[in-house]
Amino acid sequence: MITTAAQDQFTAYGLSHWAVLVVFAAGAAAAVRVGRAHCHSPAQRRVSRGFGVVLLALDVAALAYTLTAREESLVDSVPLHLSDLAGFVAAYALLTHSRRAVALTYYWCLTLSPQALFFPVLDSPDFPHHEFLAFWSLHLLVVWAAVYLTWGVGLHPTWRDYRTTVVITACWAATAMLVNSATGTNYGFLNRKPESGSVLDLLGPWPWYVVAEVALILATWALLTWPWTWRRGRTHRSDGVGGWPT
């Protein structure tokens, strides 16, 4: 039996990665079915809160492991990547259905988190290593949370949610860049690209890839907002019903 280190290491679009993508698709479909099955019923809140508790527990456990593993310096372990923050925001959205948290979950987890699914920056042993399982569990769950809240429960974004998310994300980016400049870190990959390669390689050198990324994100978020607001406007005109579900 061959057990070389290269074979034991995770490889993008290897067998384990394709298996993760299959699980992702199946889980997204299940999230929609479960959300719709319990929509506007007492069970909906129990399911949503249970999902939130599981996600929050995994995020806290992952953070505790990172802070105590000592493989990275403490300054590199602060959960300042959007992928780190997205887990806590999604958990809060599931627990409370807070409008801002749900909006952040929708925009962050349906556009930024999937980058990790299709262009993973994962330097770890392959399945079933705990780092592999933690990485994919957290990234899959936040996308499923966004799918569940949007297409399952029916919490849809508005242009106000779009603007709020843009402002909050801009504040995060400014904070991350200040921390990066002061500490030499690279939160959000705002100061340099990942060494392992990513989709950012297609957008040119720094700082132009950041400018291009911002433009793409703003345009994509606008496109993700328009169908819901257009349909809500038609509903208002036809029967006076619409808006944020209660």
Image (cartoon, rainbow, N blue to C red):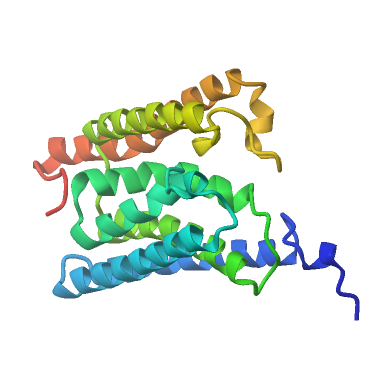
Q: Which residue corresponds to the image point at 29% horizontal and 40% vertical from the top-left?
A: 228
Q: Which residue corresponds to the image point at 87% horizontal and 69% vertical from the top-left?
A: 4
The N terminus - image quarter: bottom right
Please say whether residue 156 is visible from this viewpoint: no
Horizontally, residue 223 falls left or right of residue 245, namely right
Horizontally, residue 54 falls left or right of residue 190, namely left
Residue 134 percent coordinates (x, y): 53, 66
Residue furthest right as drawn = 1
Residue 9 percent coordinates (x, y): 76, 63
Residues 52 and 57: in front is 57
Q: Which residue corresponds to the image point at 40% horizontal and 62% vertical from the top-left?
A: 59
Residues 77 and 153: in front is 77
Please say whether residue 242 is visible from this viewpoint: yes
- Check the image and report above or below for 174 versus 49: above
Residue 211 percent coordinates (x, y): 52, 20
Residue 8 percent coordinates (x, y): 78, 68
- Check the image and report above or below for 89 versus 129: above
Horizontally, residue 150 falls left or right of residue 232, namely right
